[in-house]
Amino acid sequence: MRDEDTANGIASLVRGNAADARELRANIVVFARRLGDPQITRMVNEVLRGQRNVRDVLRTPEFNDVGQRHVATIERGLDELSADERSAVLSSLGRRPEAEELEESEGRLQSLRVADLSVSPVDRWGEVDPDPERPGR
Amino acid sequence: MATFSVKPAALHAYADLLGGDGGSLGSALNLQYLTDYSAYVDEWIKLGDGGLLFQKIKDRITVIHDRLSLDSLNISTNLVESSMGLDAAATTYRNTDRDVSEHIDAAYHTGRPEGLPGSDGGASLSAPDKELTEPSEEGGVPELAQQILDGAGVMSVSDLVLKILGWCGLDVMGWVRDRFTGSMAELAQCKNALDNLASFDSTASSDVSIGAAHMLTQWSGNAANAAQDTFAKTSDGLSSHATALSGVSNTMTALIAGIQELTAAIEGGITTAIDAALEAAAAVAAAGCLEEVPGVDVLADIIGGWRVYKVYKAVKEVTDIWNVVWAGNEGVMGLIMTLAGGLDGWDVSSDLPKTPYYNGAQGPAPTYSGSS
C-alpha cells in the first residue's frame, strides 16, 4: 500500500486491499476530470499526494450530485427493462462474479468510463491536470 | 420445659416494628413493603417502548415487575399478620397472671430445632426505605439506535451512499431503529434499582433478626422459642429474596455487556458496508456510460459488478449478525429469556414461614409435628 494511501485514508477505507485502493484512486481522478471543477480538482490532487482525506471528496455536494444523477440513470435503465431482464439483472446483486466474468465486466466498465476522456493512457490514473485545455497539451 | 418469663412490652415493641407504627424506623416494615417498595418497583422496574430488542427485554422486565409487586404484597401481609399475632400474645400475657401464662406456654410446646439464629450482637436497626434512592444511569446511553447510527457515521453519509445501501437491501436508518431503538440508560437504571431493592430486602432481613433478638432477651419459654424459629425463617426468607434479586441484577449486567458487544459488532459491520458503498459510489460517479440510459448488459455489469457485490456482502454480514443473535437461544437472547428466572427460586410459601407468627395464647394452638 502506498504511503499516500495511508495518509489520505484510502488504505483504511478499502481495508488494506491494494487493488481496491488503485481502483478508488482511479475513480476519483476520472470523476474530477469529467467534472472539470477547479476546486474538486485541487481536492483530488491533494488526496493523491496524501495531503487530504479521500472522504472529503466523497462527501462533497458535487460528488453526491454526479453519483445521484448516475444512480437515477441506472434506475431509469432498470425501469425500461422487461420484468425478466430486470429480475435477471437484480438477481446478480448477491452473486459473487466469477473471476473471468468480473474481469470482463470491469474491463467493459473501465472502457466505458474513460472513453470520452482526452488524456493519454500513460497519465490516465495520475494526478489530475488542473487545466486540461491549456495550449500545448 | 423452658423457663417462662415475659415482658409483654417487648412483644408490643417488636410487633410495632413489623406492622405497627414502626418504632424507631418511622414506618413499619410491612408498610414499607406495601408502599415504598412497591412504589419503587412501579417507578423503576420498567422500560419504555423500543425496537425489537428492547421490546423483548421489556416483556421480561414486566414479568419481574409483576412478580416483585406480588412478593411485596405477600411479604407485607406476612409481616403484618405476625405483628398482629405478637400483639395478641402480648395482650393476653398482660391480661393473664403468671401461672396461667406458664400453663398456656406449656400447651404451645413445639418440636423446635436446636441452634436457631437470632442474636443481634449489638447491631442497630436501619430503615430499609433509605436504600431506595434514585438508581444511577451509569453504564447506559440515552438512545441505543442513535448511538449506533452516530458511531457508524450514518448521519453524515450522503444520500447517494444511502441509496446504494438500499439497493443492497439495507435501509440503514430504518433497520437500526426498528431493532435497536431503546434506552440503555433506562435499562441501567432498572438494573441499579434491582440492586437497591436487594439492599432493602437485606436491611429488612437484618431488622427482623435484630428486633427478634432484642425481644427474646425479654421473653423466654416454649412460645418464645417458637417465635424465634418463625422470625429466623422470616429473616432468612427476606435475605433469600435479596439474593434472588442480586441474581437477576447480575444477569442484567451480563445482558447490558452483551448488548454493548452486539451493537459494537453491528456498528462495525455498518461502517464496513458504508465504506463499500462509498467505493461503489465512486465507481458510479466515474462511470461516463451513465450519462445516458444504459442497456441491459451495462446494467448487469454495474449491478453485478464487484463493487456492488462488496456492498451486498457487507450488508449481509450486518444482517447475519442480527439474525444469528435474534434466532439463537444463547448469548444476548439467552440472557433475555432467563432474565426473570432468578426469581423463580424464591417462593413465599416455602421461603417465609407458611403461617405468620401465631401464639397458642391467642386461642387453639396450631398442630405442629412432634407435638403431643
Image (cartoon, coloured by chain):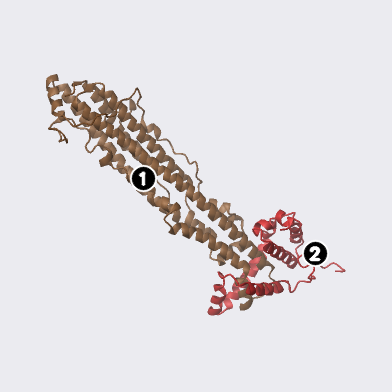
Chain colours: A red, B brown
Point out residue B283 in the picture as x, y percentages from the top left corner: 66, 67
Residue at the disc numbered 1: B342
Q: On the rendered structure, is B107 left or right of B335?
A: left
For the C terminus of chain B, which image quadrant? Answer: top left
Q: Horizontal and vertical percent for residue B31?
A: 30, 34
Along the line of sight, the residue nearer the viewer: B35 or B255: B255
Residue at 21 percent across and 37 percent down: it is B355
Q: Is residue B266 left or right of residue B58?
A: right
On screen, residue A114 above or below B273: below
Q: Please, which chain is the residue tagged with disc 1 on?
A: B
Along the line of sight, which residue is nearer the eye, B125 or B44?
A: B125
Measuring from the top left, give residue A90's x and y in whole percent.
56, 73
- Residue type highlighted by circle 2: Asp
Which-is-in-front pick, marks 2 and 1?
A: 1
- Which residue is depicted at the point 73% across and 72% down? A114
Q: Is residue B27 visible?
A: no
How many numbered marks are there? Answer: 2
Q: In the image, A19: left or right of B103?
A: right
Q: Which mark is residue A114?
A: none
Task: Please tell me which residue is depicted at 50% across the width and 53% down the height of the picture.
Answer: B262
Q: CA distance from mark 2 to mark 1?
A: 70 Å
Label 2: how many Cα within 10 Å (few below 14, some 14–19, many 20+): some
Instruction: Give the labeled residue for mark 2.
Output: A129
